[in-house]
């Protein structure tokens, strides 16, 4: 069985490359799909727009969601996901630079599964990526997707 | 007259008008009565005296001829004069020669001792007239007539009756008139009083007393109304000023909220946007070190390490700056705070950080203040952290937390560390100001700025004393000084 995707929603190419690198160094083998803004993320999740032809109906094993994004921001994306039956239970980890209490509270209220602040030091980033990847791709049991 | 004091103005007016009318009437009646008595006596005296002259003249011959019968007959002529009670003809020796007395009058008339021959006097018995009886210019006896003033008494009773009736009538009349007068005088006064009460009870300055006439009360009422108008005017001015002030406060609050929001947006963007490039710099430096190791020489690796150290420091600075901004934005909630307990907690944490376990922390018991406990914790973390840092190179690093003189509201954190030159004391609390190089002691220079901001937010004061090589003491208060 093909490993499920990890959806990385991130607009900063540096961060995209670093995250992919960190995940690789952490030996996470799941394919990483990148969405560069909120609309693209929703297109991927709901197989619309540029992702209308996505083959598998599987939801990603985890969505790594930045908050500050062009078009729709991460909070909007999270809200849409939780409103939709298909993505209601998909694990979402907020992966962001912000440590604003307001953001943390808001995303938890909306049903984020975790909130991780991107560390500046790459070592720490790798540690975080490894722990995240290990936890969500191996340890965590997600509910069966709705029929 | 004190009882008048408690009467209403209307009653007072009535009493005054009734009293004055009764007094006037009584004194007029008394004067009239006195005058009447006087004239009555005068006319009685004149009448009886005339009668006495005539009878005296006629009685001369009966005395001379000792004809008592004739004398009595003459005296009996007095029957026509009803006021005469008794009469007598006496000879010169005082012996009664003939006498007359009206029916019912008992005692025969006698001359009181020493009564002159010619006299008219009023006594308890009434009028006593004595005339000499003369013959050829020589007195041969005397005639005494006693007339009573019963008629006068009767008249006086009648007068009294009339006066009483008139008094009663005038009393009623005075009462009626005073009622009418009362309305024009006490009416406005009562109205004024009621208005004043309404003003004082209801704090309602829009009411006005009904205008009265042009007299003193009218003047009082219009002065009172003018006063009310002025108060109302002042009130509305005040109200207007208050509303304006409120509006201004509202506007300022809005501005403040806007600038707060701006600040928030700024710190948000600092935390998010400034960190991202740092992450890239550090991440790719690390990638370079890891993946391109073969093409790097020692120098290149060293430079990359320096790049990474720089990014780490920049990250720390940003974090500290954000912390400082957060402290400014945090809502201040004052409550009883146990500084001793917090200091002990911080001390335990510091001890954990200090692997050598040489640090000695002495915390005075019972330090309390009314302050925000979260901010106090940050404050003590910074001050005690500094104290620990700057004394870490001593053999016996000691940090003391206590209160000046063991009481009062001035707390201190003292160490026996590196200390500082008092010449730079004013630079201690500036953000990013440092008195030591990173090689000596690490730090971002934000700790004491944070301390100062926390103290400022509490309305307190913070200052420091120190000496190079001997240590430093930081004093602070958390409540505004009264």
Image: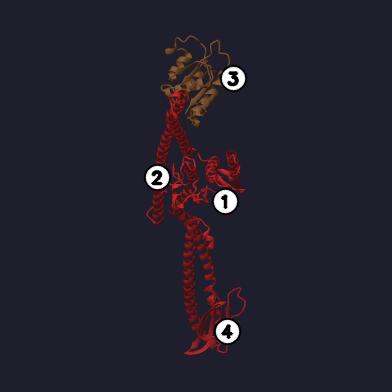
Asked if residue B434 shows in the view, the reply is yes
Q: Residue at x 39, y 43 (%)?
A: B240
Q: Secondary structure at mark 2?
A: helix
Residue located beneath label 3 in the image = A139
Categorize mark 2 by other alpha carbons within 10 Å: few (<14), some (14-19), many (20+). few
State which chain disc 1 sits on: B
x then y, percent, for residue A102: 49, 30
| Residue drawn at (49%, 40%) of the image | B442
| Residue B241: image tag | 2
Real-space CA distance between mark 4 and mark 3, rounded to the nearest whole angstrom: 157 Å
Disc 1 + disc 2, Cβ < 8 Å: no
Q: Dot 3 surroundings within 10 Å: few (below 14), some, or many (20 or more)?
A: few
Write down the colour of chain B: red
* Host chain of mark 3: A
Packing grade of label 4 (10 A; few <14, some 14-19, many >=20) is few
Labels 1 & 4 near each other (Cβ < 8 A): no
Above or below, B434 relative to A134:
below
Distance from label 2 to label 4 (Cα)?
103 Å
Q: CA distance from mark 1 to mark 2?
A: 46 Å
Q: Is residue A88 left or right of residue B227?
A: right
Q: Nearer the viewer, mark 1 or mark 4?
A: 1
Q: Is residue B2 above or below residue B133?
A: above
Is A27 displayed left or right of B256 in the figure?
A: right
Label 1 sits on residue: B403
Q: Are marks 1 and 2 on the same chain?
A: yes
Find numbered disc 1 in the image and state the secondary structure of the residue it sits on: strand
Chain in brown colour? A
Q: Nearer the viewer, mark 3 or mark 1?
A: 3
Q: Secondary structure at mark 4?
A: loop
């Amino acid at each position: 069985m093909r490993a499920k995707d990890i959806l990385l929603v991130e607009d900063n190419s540096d961060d995209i490359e670093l995250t992919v690198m960190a995940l690789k160094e952490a030996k996470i083998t799941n394919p990483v799909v990148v969405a560069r803004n909120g609309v693209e993320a929703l297109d991927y999740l709901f197989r619309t727009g540029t992702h209308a032809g996505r083959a598998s109906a599987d939801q990603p094993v985890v969505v790594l969601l930045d908050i500050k994004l062009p078009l729709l921001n991460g909070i909007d994306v999270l809200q849409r996901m939780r409103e939709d039956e298909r993505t209601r239970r998909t694990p979402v980890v907020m992966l962001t630079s912000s440590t604003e209490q307001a953001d943390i509270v808001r995303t938890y209220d909306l049903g984020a599964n975790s909130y991780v602040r991107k560390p500046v030091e790459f070592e720490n980033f790798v540690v975080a990526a490894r722990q995240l990847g290990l936890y969500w791709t191996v340890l965590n049991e997600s509910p069966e997707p709705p029929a | 007259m004190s009882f008048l004091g408690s009467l209403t103005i209307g009653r007072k007016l009535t009493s005054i008008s009734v009293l004055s009318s009764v007094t006037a009437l009584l004194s007029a009646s008394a004067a009239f009565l006195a005058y009447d008595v006087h004239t009555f006596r005068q006319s009685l005296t004149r009448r009886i005296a005339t009668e006495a002259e005539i009878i005296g003249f006629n009685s001369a011959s009966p005395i001379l001829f000792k004809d008592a019968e004739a004398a009595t007959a003459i005296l009996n002529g007095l029957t026509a004069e009803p006021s005469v009670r008794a009469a007598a003809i006496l000879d010169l020796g005082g012996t009664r020669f003939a006498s007359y007395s009206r029916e019912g009058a008992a005692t025969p008339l006698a001359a009181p001792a020493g009564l002159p021959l010619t006299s008219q006097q009023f006594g308890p018995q009434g009028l006593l007239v004595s005339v000499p009886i003369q013959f050829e210019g020589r007195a041969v006896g005397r005639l005494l007539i006693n007339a009573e003033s019963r008629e006068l008494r009767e008249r006086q009773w009648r007068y009294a009756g009339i006066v009483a009736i008139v008094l009663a009538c005038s009393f009623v009349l005075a009462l009626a008139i005073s009622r009418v007068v009362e309305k024009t005088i006490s009416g406005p006064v009562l109205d004024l009083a009621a208005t004043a009460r309404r003003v004082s009870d209801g704090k309602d300055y829009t009411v006005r007393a009904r205008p009265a006439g042009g007299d003193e009360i009218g003047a009082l009422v219009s002065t009172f109304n003018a006063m009310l108008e002025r108060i109302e005017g002042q009130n509305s001015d005040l109200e207007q000023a208050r509303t304006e002030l409120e509006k201004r406060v509202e506007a300022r609050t809005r501005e403040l909220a806007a600038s707060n929001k701006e600040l928030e947006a700024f710190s948000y963007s600092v935390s998010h946007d400034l960190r991202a490039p740092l992450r890239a710099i550090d991440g790719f430096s690390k990638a370079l070190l890891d993946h391109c190791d073969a093409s790097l020489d020692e120098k290149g690796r060293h430079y990359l390490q320096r790049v990474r150290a720089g990014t780490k420091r920049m990250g720390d600075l940003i974090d500290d700056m954000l912390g400082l901004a957060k402290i400014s934005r945090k809502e201040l909630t004052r409550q009883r705070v146990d500084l001793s307990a917090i200091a002990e907690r911080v001390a335990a944490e510091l001890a954990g950080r200090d692997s050598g376990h040489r640090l000695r922390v002495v915390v005075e018991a019972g330090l309390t203040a009314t302050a925000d406990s979260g901010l106090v914790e940050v404050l003590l973390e910074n001050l005690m952290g500094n104290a620990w840092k700057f004394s870490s190179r001593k053999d016996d690093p000691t940090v003391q937390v206590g209160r000046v003189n063991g009481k009062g509201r001035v707390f201190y954190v003292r160490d026996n560390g590196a200390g500082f030159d008092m010449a730079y004391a004013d630079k201690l609390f500036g953000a990013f100001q440092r008195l030591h190089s990173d090689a000596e002691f690490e730090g971002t220079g934000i700790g004491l700025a944070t301390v100062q901001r926390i103290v400022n937010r509490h309305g307190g004061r913070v200052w420091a004393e120190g000496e190079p090589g001997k240590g430093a003491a930081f004093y602070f208060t958390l409540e505004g000084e009264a």
